[in-house]
Amino acid sequence: MRRSRLLPAVVALGLLVPAGAAQAGTHPFPDRIALPAGFQPEGIAIGPGPVAYLGSRVDGRIYRADLRTGRGGVFSAGPGTPSLGLKTGDGLLYVAGGSGGDARVIDQRSGKVLKRYVLSTAPAFVNDVVLTRDAAWVTDSTNKVLYRLPRGVHGKARTLPLTGEIAYQTGVNANGIAQTPDRRSLLIVQSNTGTLFKVDPKSGHTTTVDLGGESLPNGDGMLLNGDTLFVVQNRLNVVAVLKVARDGSKARVVERVGDAKFDVPATVARYKDRLYLPNARFTTTPTPDTPYDAVSIRR
């Protein structure tokens, strides 16, 4: 039902692969998706099906692309403030609003903003989002809190202060967010310290995850697949691959994966055996003509 609900919009954009396209000499699932010049991507979400959504940190536009062809277009106009972390679920796209201090819920079919939550009227950097069974949890890299949004478009947002071992410092603090493998707690990575924390979603209490002496500096977007956690270390141009205990109390870095196509990737999403990462190019001075893309690697 959810997949068929999206189909008309995808057809309307011309994103579906024509019958026999592979036989006609095209290359399905290209490893590079070109984005509009000056787009400045950061967040990515995939699904249902081989459809990716990418947000602009310039003006909040959302670009939708068919992973089979690499073709796409802007399907939701931005509010003039950033769109950072993204997640999809129930036919909806959840968007972290960066310096706009908000979060938005967008209809995946029409691109219409169905709900906007004002999370902070003070300076904020609403950065990334993860979906749990009944909530969307959002990080703030400036304020020592998480935000809990109800799934769907009804209800109110709640602010959860972070206590315990995490200490905010100058720079980017809590960034990427994921669940623990047992789904009972949350994991957040603190970019400026490289520390991974476990968070109790009821109390906000944080404890340091034992990484066996490792750290995750420049940790950005995260993705959990079973007991494997992928952590993008943006300016290091690598993805750290960790094995995580079911309760999230400890984790082990198994390897770090780089690729020649990486140019400061920020976040990560998965489709089948591929990881997709938008190149944020934080070390490149942006102009309206600066090229941007998202790339894929096989895992």
Image (tube, rainbow, N blue to C red):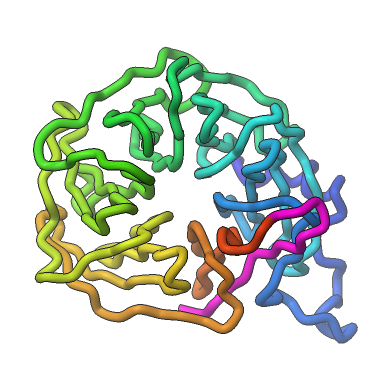
Q: Is residue 287 magenta?
A: yes
Front residue of 71 and 109? 71
Residue 160 seen: yes
> Residue visible at 34% across and 58% down?
224
The picture quadrant where one finds residue 253 is bottom left
> Residue visible at 17% across and 47% down?
198
Q: Judge whether 246 appears above or below 120 on screen.
A: below
**Farthest residue in the right direction?**
24
Q: Give the magenta range.
A: 286-299
Q: Is residue 182 magenta?
A: no
Q: Position of residue 83 (x, y in %)?
A: 60, 39
Q: Quadrant of the N terminus?
A: top right
> Residue visible at 43% across and 74% down?
238
Left or right: 190 as drawn, with respect to 32:
left
The picture quadrant where one finds residue 151 is top left
Q: Quadrant of the C terminus?
A: bottom left
Picture mark count = 0
Residue 174 seen: no
Q: Position of residue 163 (x, y in %)?
A: 14, 31
The picture quadrant where one finds residue 202 is top left
Q: Position of residue 282 (x, y in %)?
A: 56, 58
Left or right: 293 as drawn, with respect to 136:
right
Left or right: 128 as drawn, with respect to 104:
left
Q: Judge whether 30 appears above or below 161 on screen.
A: below
